[in-house]
Amino acid sequence: MEKKWYEKNGTDGDVVISTRIRFARNLEEYPFPIRCSRDIRQKINEKVKDAVLNSNSVISSRFSCINIDELDPSGKVSLVERHLVSPEFISEDQGRCLLLLDDESVSVMINEEDHIRLQVMQEGFELDKAYELASRLDTLLDERLKFAFSDKLGYLTQCPTNLGTGMRASVMLHLPALQATKAMRKISENLSKLGLTIRGAFGEGSEPVACMYQLSNQITLGISEKTAIENLKSITTQLVNQELNARQALAKEITVQDKIYRSYGILQNARLLSGEEALNHLSNIRMGITTKLISSISLDTINRLIVETQPATLIKLTGKPLDSAQRDKIRAEIVRKEFGIQASQKK
Amino acid sequence: MLCEQCKKNQANTHVKSIINGEVTELSLCSSCAAKMGYGNVFDHMFDIGSMMSGFMGEPMASALAQERKCPGCGLSFAQISKGGRVGCAKCYDVFYDRLLPSIKRIHGNTIHTGKRLRKPQLTSGEAAVQNAAAEKIAALSQDLKNAVANQEYEKAAKLRDKINELKAQNGGV
């Protein structure tokens, strides 16, 4: 089976794990989701489904429709862990539908906060490519669905924070060296002046788990899609360079090398691994690979393990309900197997 | 990160304001955020409500605020500001003036400059006004020609001024 975008390493993949473009759109003829009855929501489901599946696009036949209410809890959460839907989307049974492309790079959430949340994901740093695809699909869908649009305010959305372009563009960044050198706070303060924002991709604490960050545009009105993307691109490029320089310097320190090789030992031998522990060690290994300290495992595999070792995705993979202790055991087995295989193949 | 106000609780609300291009940012815990009035994006709208009641007298302002409902979704402006969510596309039209301050506060801008699939359309009212003006100008121009041909220069000058005035009013139709 062909690899999904989250199982691959892409452009500038040392630092940029993935790129996402998301458009918020609403159908002109219906009220926004908070004011829609279940019947109307059902109608919107059908209309959008029809428009996507029968659109004049080469990929329209590769979409499948997932009724969220019919999924078991781990099936729902796994969609979030794979970054295919927002946590909000699976929060309630409201007759919501997801249209998902076979390679999981395009998803259309119907009846989330807006009637349509169209999302394109790509591995690595691919803002232009992701925007092109998203915009093309958006234009095709507008022909059939007629999106709510005002000359002054642009695309009209349920929450005014998305007015205008309705676009959220973001990159997921792995920044272990900038986090270790305490540079993140200063960076995030400066970003807001450019209408960008950065936050931890995993975990709620003050320090993001596994040094994963999400950088995205915040302002959608009065700035064109192109300008917003250019701003995001230029800051990402700067962060990539700063991170790589800081990594080179850090990798010479024996304490840092020790941390990376210890993580390697743990992932190769541990019999129990919690989700957060696995993520943190995988983050160290990622840094080890990009600084050429570790060569026996690929970034593709690490990216895949980061997704596969998440609790709900783990349950989905094994096809069995697992409690937390069972998950820790299976998680350790999956990781150990990868580290064992790749290490022995290299020899 | 700790709340910048009380320096005790974990900050979970980030407030950014852009006023005349000056950006200020605050990280706050939920209780400090609520105290400082950053509960939801429309909260400060109640200030506008009370300002209006100052101008118009309490009963009239509150009657107006209560009665006007969006024909598209049935929400009143008070309901929108309470929920922080707009009910439908028409709300943006109906409550445009009252939503604008929040929109400006969020984005620092009020005019869309991005993707546009359809050409700007005039409302039927605007189009009718423009058509009427264009017809009138055409008629006056014909009179002007006749006046010049008949060497009625005083009349021609008056007609010319009238045409220019009409053109200016209608953005150079």
Image (cartoon, coloured by chain):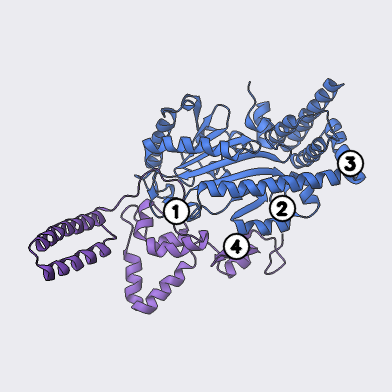
> Residue at 81% across / 44% down in the picture?
A247
Spatial CA distance of label 4 from label 3 is: 39 Å
- Labels 1, 2: front one: 1
Query: What is the chain identity of the residue bearing mark 3?
Result: A
Q: Which residue is mark 1?
A: B112
- Give the mark toward the camera: 4 or 3: 3
Q: Is residue B133 above or below residue A64?
A: below
Quarter of the image where one finds residue B99? bottom left
What's the chain of the residue with tag 2?
Answer: A
| Residue placed under numbered mark 3 in the picture | A257
Q: Is residue A104 above or below residue B37?
A: above
Residues flagged by tags 3 and 1 on a common chain = no
Chain for colour blue: A
Between label 4 and label 2, give the one nearer the viewer: 4
Three-letter amino acid code at the position of disc 2: Gly
Q: Nearer the viewer, mark 4 or mark 1?
A: 1
Q: Which residue is mark 4?
A: B15
Q: Circle 2 sits on which residue?
A: A205
